[in-house]
C-alpha cells in the first residue's frame, strides 16, 4: 500500500520539497510512528535534514550532521541500519537541540543507498521505548530503496544548485598499470545508468515475469559465451568463464530478487538491491579471490539490467571509446572486445580476470584509479597512460597536447626498439647481457616474439591457480606447460613453482590469519609443508616438457636446506616419471630465487647445488630495507640505487661467480633502464622484465660503457653517497645518454 502511495507522489506535479514533505507524512502514518525524517547527502561529508514529520519544522535544512557523526551519521558511514529502543544510550548518539528530538526514545534508521553509494538516511522515531520488529525494519529498507531510486531520478531536486555540475573540471587519477600502452578517447561508462521510471511494482505478477525472462536471457547469453569462447583461446579464459557461468545459475540470487519483487519493488530495483549488497560487501572484503567473485556478480547484475531495459549485449558504443568501470567481469570485457581503445577501472588488480582479458586483447588498462566512476560522465574526453598507470579525465589543453606528443614519441621510440629487436644487448665495452621477459599466462607468450626477449626468465605459475575456482588437475596443468613451451619455440622458459600466500590467496585454500603475511606461511614454506602440491606441479611440468629441456625454480628460499629438500622432491618425481617410461627432460635445471638476504650468506654447498639463482628483487628489496612492497607509505622510500643495496647485489654476484652459478635478476627494477644499467655495472648479466621494458633497457645498455658506470658507482660509494641516482644521472648527462634513461 505504502509503496503504491509513494509511486503516486512521484507521479504528481510539484517541486522536490513538496514531494519530500508528503512522503515523510505518508511513511509516519502508515508505519504508525510519531516521527519520520529524511536526511540527504550534501556534498561528500554532510547530511542535511531535508524533511520531517514530528521533529521541529524549523530545523529542516538547518540541522546538519557530518558523515560518522551521531546515529544518522553512523548509518551513512557504515551503510548499515540502526534499530534501538533507547536512542540516547546507543553509542555515538548525539542530540541535535534544534530538532527537539530529546523526547523520542525508540529510533530506527536505514541508509538510502543505491549501488553502493549512500545518498541519505531515512529515520523513524517514537516517544515510548518500543522495539521495532524485523518486519518493520525490512519494510523501512524497501521504502528506502524506492526513495533512492527517486533521488536518482531527481524527484527531490529543488532550486538548490548543490546537486549540479562538479563534472566539468579536469580530473587526474594515479592508478596502477595492468596492461601497457597509451590511448586517448571518450568515456564510455560500463554500468548502465538505468533510470527506473517507476521503482514500485504496479503488478507483482508482471514484474516477476519480467525478471524471470530477463534471467533466462542472461543465462542463455552466458552459456553461449562459454561455448563460443570468444577470443579463441581455451585455457585460462575458459576457466574464468566457467566460474562466471556458475554464478549466473545461482539459485539464491534469483530467490532473493524474486522476494524483493514480491515485497512490491520493480524488477530493476530488485536487481539493484542485490547489487547494493554486493558492493557493500566489496567495500569490506580484502580477500582478492572473494573480491573477484563479487565483481563477477556485479557484472552479471549489470547484464541483467540491460536485459530488463531491452538492450541486448554489445549495444552501441562510441568510436574511440575508453571504458570506465568500477570493475568489469571477463565476459563483459570480451563482449566489448577490440572496439575499446582503453580500459580504466576503479577497483581490480593486475592479476584480475579483467586484466587477463585486457592483455589478451592488448588494450591499455589502468586499475585502481580512485574515484574515476564518480567523476567520469559518458562522452568526457579521457587519456589513458597504461605504462605509468595514469588517467587524465577532461584534460586541460596543455595536458592533451603533451600527451599527444608523448604518443608520437612513443611511436618513434617503438620504431627504434623495433630496429634493435634482433640485435644483442651488447654494451660499448663489449659485455653482452641476456634480456628476458616475465610472464604468467599463456596470453603473455606472443610478446616473446615482438619484444626480442631471449626467453622467459620468470614464468609465474601461480596466476593459473589464482584465476580458477578449483585446483587445476595434473593433465590440465601439463597441457598448459606444454603450450607455454611450444609457444616459446625452443627459447628457455623458467617456471617458478607455485608462489602463493601473502596477498595471493587461492579460493580453495583456507585463508590463514597471520599478523605479517609477507613474512608468513608462503611460497616454498607452503610447498614444503604440503608437499603434494609441489609434487603434482613437478609431475605436470615433467609431462608438459615431454622430453624438452626444463628449467624450474623455487620462490623465497631463505636457507639452504629448503632448497635441498625441494630439489630432492623434484628429483624423486623425475625418477618416478622415468620409471614409468616417460621421457626425461633433455636437461633439467633446478634453481632458487634469492628473495631473502639470508640466502646470500648460505654455505658454498648451496651455490654449488643450485643450477642457477634468480634474484627476486621485489621481495629482496622489501626484506632488505624492511619496507612492505604493498604499502604506498613506505615502498618508495628506498630504491635499488641505494648504495647498500648495490653493494649487497655486488656481493651476490661475486659469490655466484666464485662457484660458476648463473645469476639473473627478475624484479621490476630489471625493467627500469637506469636501475638495469646499475645492476649490469654490478656484474649481473641476465635481466628478466616486462616485455615492454626490453626495448628501452636494451637501447640504454647498447649506448653505455659499463666500466665507466661501475667506476661512477664505486666512487660515489667511496664518497659516502647514500643513493647513486644523482651520480649516475650526472654520468649519463656527461656521456650524452641521459635521454635514454
Ligand atoms: C620478486 O619478488 O621480485 C619476484 C619476481 O616475484 P614476485 O614479484 O612474483 O613476488
Ligand atoms: Mg617474489
Image: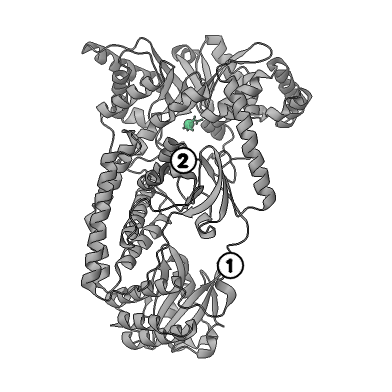
In the shown orientation, is residue 439 left or right of residue 678? left
Instruction: Find numbered disc 2 in the image and state the secondary structure of the residue it sits on.
Output: loop
Please name the residue shown 37% across and 24% down the image.
484
The circle on residue 350 is 2
In the shown orientation, is residue 396 left or right of residue 236? right
* Residue 327 vs residue 589, the one in the foreground: 327
Q: Position of residue 163 (x, y in %)?
A: 55, 72
In the shown orientation, is residue 32 left or right of residue 387? left
Please name the residue shown 75% across and 28% down the image.
727
Mark 1 and mark 2 residues within 8 Å of each other at the beta carbon = no
Task: Report which residue position mark 1 lands on.
Answer: 165
Please name the residue shown 55% across and 82% down the image.
61
Q: Nearer the viewer, mark 1 or mark 2?
A: 1
Q: CA distance from mark 1 to mark 2?
A: 33 Å
- The answer to whether any part of residue 532 appears in the image is yes
Number of other residues with Cα within 10 Å of mark 2, as a class: few under 14, some 14 to 19, many 20 or more:
some
**154 is higher (above) or lower (below) than 424:** below
Q: Position of residue 277 (x, y in %)?
A: 36, 61
Please name the residue shown 63% across and 30% down the image.
412
Task: Find residue 122 and report its image quarter.
Answer: bottom left
Q: Quadrant of the N terminus?
A: bottom left
In the shown orientation, is residue 98 left or right of residue 311? right
**474 is higher (above) or lower (below) than 708:** below
Q: Position of residue 570 (x, y in %)?
A: 33, 18
Amino acid at each position: 500500500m505504502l509503496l503504491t502511495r509513494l509511486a503516486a507522489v512521484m507521479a504528481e506535479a510539484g517541486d522536490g520539497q513538496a514531494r519530500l514533505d508528503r512522503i515523510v507524512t505518508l511513511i509516519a502514518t502508515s508505519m504508525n510512528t510519531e516521527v519520520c525524517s529524511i536526511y540527504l547527502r550534501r556534498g561528500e561529508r554532510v547530511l542535511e535534514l531535508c524533511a520531517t514529520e514530528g521533529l521541529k519544522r524549523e530545523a529542516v535544512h538547518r540541522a546538519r550532521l557530518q558523515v560518522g557523526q551521531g546515529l544518522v551519521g553512523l548509518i551513512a558511514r557504515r551503510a548499515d541500519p540502526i534499530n534501538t529502543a533507547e536512542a540516547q544510550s546507543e553509542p555515538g548518539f548525539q542530540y541535535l537541540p534544534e530538532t527537539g528530538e530529546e523526547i523520542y526514545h525508540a529510533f530506527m534508521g536505514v541508509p538510502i543507498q543505491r549501488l553502493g553509494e549512500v545518498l541519505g538516511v531515512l529515520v523513524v522515531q517514537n516517544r515510548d521505548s518500543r522495539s521495532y520488529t524485523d518486519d518493520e525494519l525490512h519494510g523501512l529498507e524497501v521504502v528506502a530503496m524506492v526513495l533512492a531510486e527517486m533521488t536518482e531520478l531527481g524527484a527531490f531536486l529543488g532550486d538548490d544548485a548543490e546537486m549540479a555540475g562538479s563534472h566539468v573540471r579536469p580530473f587526474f587519477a594515479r592508478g596502477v598499470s595492468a596492461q601497457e600502452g597509451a590511448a586517448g578517447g571518450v568515456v564510455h561508462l560500463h554500468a548502465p545508468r538505468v533510470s527506473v521510471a517507476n521503482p514500485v511494482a504496479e503488478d507483482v505478477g508482471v514484474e516477476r515475469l519480467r525478471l524471470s525472462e530477463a534471467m533466462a536471457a542472461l543465462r542463455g547469453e552466458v552459456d553461449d559465451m562459454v561455448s563460443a569462447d570468444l577470443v579463441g583461446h581455451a585455457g585460462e579464459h575458459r576457466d574464468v568463464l566457467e566460474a562466471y557461468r556458475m554464478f549466473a545459475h545461482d539459485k539464491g540470487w534469483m530467490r532473493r530478487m524474486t522476494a524483493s519483487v514480491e515485497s512490491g519493488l520493480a524488477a530493476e530495483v530488485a536487481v539493484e538491491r542485490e547489487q547494493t549488497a554486493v558492493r557493500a560487501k566489496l567495500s569490506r572484503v580484502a580477500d582478492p579471490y572473494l573480491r573477484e567473485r563479487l565483481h563477477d556478480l556485479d557484472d552479471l547484475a549489470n547484464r541483467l539490467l540491460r536485459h530488463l531495459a531491452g538492450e541486448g549485449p554489445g549495444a552501441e558504443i562510441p568510436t574511440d571509446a575508453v571504458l570506465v568501470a568500477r570493475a568489469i567481469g571477463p565476459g563483459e570485457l570480451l563482449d566489448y572486445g577490440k572496439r575499446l581503445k582503453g580500459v580504466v577501472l576503479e577497483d581490480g588488480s593486475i592479476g584480475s580476470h579483467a586484466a587477463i582479458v585486457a592483455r589478451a586483447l592488448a588494450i591499455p588498462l589502468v586499475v585502481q584509479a580512485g574515484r574515476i566512476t564518480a567523476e567520469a560522465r559518458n562522452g568526457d574526453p579521457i587519456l589513458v597512460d597504461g605504462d605509468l598507470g595514469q588517467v587524465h579525465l577532461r584534460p586541460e589543453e596543455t595536458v592533451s597536447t603533451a600527451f599527444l606528443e608523448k604518443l608520437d614519441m612513443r611511436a618513434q621510440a617503438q620504431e627504434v626498439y623495433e630496429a634493435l629487436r634482433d640485435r644483442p644487448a651488447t654494451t660499448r665495452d663489449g659485455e653482452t647481457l641476456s634480456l628476458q621477459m616475465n610472464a604468467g599466462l599463456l596470453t603473455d607468450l606472443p610478446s616473446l616474439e615482438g619484444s626480442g626477449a631471449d626467453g622467459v626468465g620468470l614464468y609465474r605459475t601461480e596466476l593459473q591457480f589464482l584465476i580458477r575456482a578449483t585446483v587445476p588437475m595434473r593433465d590440465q596443468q601439463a597441457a598448459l606447460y606444454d603450450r607455454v613451451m611450444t609457444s616459446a619455440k625452443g627459447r628457455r622458459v623458467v617456471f617458478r613453482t607455485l608462489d602463493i600466500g601473502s596477498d595471493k590467496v587461492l579460493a580453495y585454500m583456507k585463508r590463514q590469519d597471520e599478523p605479517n603475511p609477507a613474512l608468513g606461511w608462503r611460497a616454498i614454506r607452503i610447498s614444503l609443508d604440503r608437499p603434494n602440491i609441489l609434487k603434482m606441479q613437478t609431475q605436470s611440468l615433467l609431462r608438459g616438457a615431454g622430453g624438452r629441456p626444463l628449467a624450474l625454480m623455487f620462490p623465497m628460499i631463505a636457507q639452504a636446506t629448503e632448497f635441498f629438500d625441494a630439489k630432492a622432491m623434484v628429483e624423486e618425481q623425475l625418477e618416478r616419471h622415468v620409471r614409468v617410461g616417460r621421457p626425461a627432460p633433455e636437461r633439467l635445471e633446478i634453481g632458487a630465487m634469492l628473495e631473502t638476504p639470508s640466502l646470500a650468506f648460505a654455505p658454498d654447498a648451496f651455490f654449488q647445488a643450485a643450477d642457477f639463482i634468480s634474484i627476486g628483487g621485489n621481495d629482496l628489496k622489501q626484506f632488505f630495507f624492511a619496507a612492505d612492497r604493498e604499502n604506498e607509505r613506505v615502498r618508495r622510500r628506498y630504491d635499488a640505487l641505494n648504495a647498500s643495496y648495490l653493494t649487497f647485489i655486488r656481493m651476490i654476484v661475486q659469490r655466484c661467480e666464485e662457484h660458476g652459478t648463473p645469476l639473473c635478476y627478475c624484479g621490476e627494477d630489471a625493467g627500469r633502464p637506469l636501475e638495469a644499467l646499475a645492476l649490469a655495472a654490478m656484474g649481473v648479466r641476465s635481466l628478466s622484465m616486462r616485455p615492454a621494458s626490453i626495448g628501452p633497457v636494451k637501447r640504454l645498455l647498447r649506448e653505455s660503457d659499463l666500466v665507466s658506470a661501475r667506476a661512477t658507482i664505486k666512487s660515489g660509494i667511496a664518497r659516502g653517497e647514500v643513493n647513486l641516482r644523482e651520480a649516475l644521472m650526472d654520468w649519463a648527462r656527461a656521456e650524452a645518454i641521459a635521454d635514454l634513461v
